[in-house]
Image: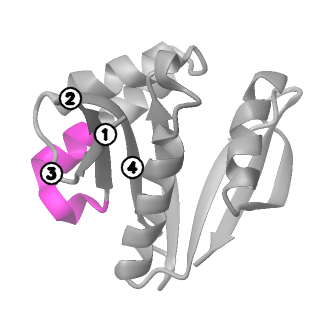
Amino acid sequence: MNISLRSEVYPQDVENVRNIVESTGFFYPHEVKIAVELVEERLSKGPASGYEFLFAEVDGTTVGYSCFGLNPSTKKSFDLYWIATFKDLRGKGIGKFLLEETCRKVKEMGGTAIYAETSGRPMYKPTRMFYENNGFICEAVLRDFYDDGDDKLIFVRRL
């Protein structure tokens, strides 16, 4: 599979991101809305939004993306806000490629660590394993953060 990357955000990425995030089956409607709002924020404010994007494309079709940015209360710590691929394309190396390129870009921008958070619900076990298999360690667990029995896990990868 020949994957290309782009960092420029286009108006059609609003729907691209919505479709990708909805396809996963992992996120509540309000979470999908947040993912879309970050794209809209980038489109309206440009780099001043603080949101950076990488889009993975195969044969001209956007199949995955990451959204990340410098945590504004830090000097060198970046947050990985979103990373997702179409559900039907999971396990094909697109997410790993996106993550590696995101980490490379963060390091290029002066970042020394990238933080990702995810749910402790059982359905998120593949997500947690994805982070662990790609050099992240779980540094914090916030019990019942999202809801009763739904912990927030914070992973970090030092760059």
Give the alpha-carbon distance from disc 3 to disc 2, as whole Å: 17 Å
Q: Which residue is mark 4?
A: 67
Quadrant in the rendering for residue 112:
bottom right
Q: Position of residue 27 (x, y in %)?
A: 56, 21
Vertical placement of residue 153 versus 109, above or below: above
- Part of the protein shown in magenta: 39-50
Q: Are marks 2 and 4 in contact (CB under 8 Å)?
A: no
Q: Which residue is mark 3?
A: 8
Crowd around label 3: few <14 · some 14–19 · many ≥20 (10 Å): few
Q: Amino acid at mark 4?
A: Cys
SS class of the residue under badge 2?
A: loop
Vertical placement of residue 83 versus 74, above or below: above
Residue at x-position 14% and y-position 45%: 43
- Report the front residue among 50 and 129: 129
Vertical placement of residue 68 versus 96, above or below: below
Q: Which residue is mark 1?
A: 2
Q: Position of residue 35 (x, y in %)?
A: 39, 34
Q: Amino acid at mark 3?
A: Glu
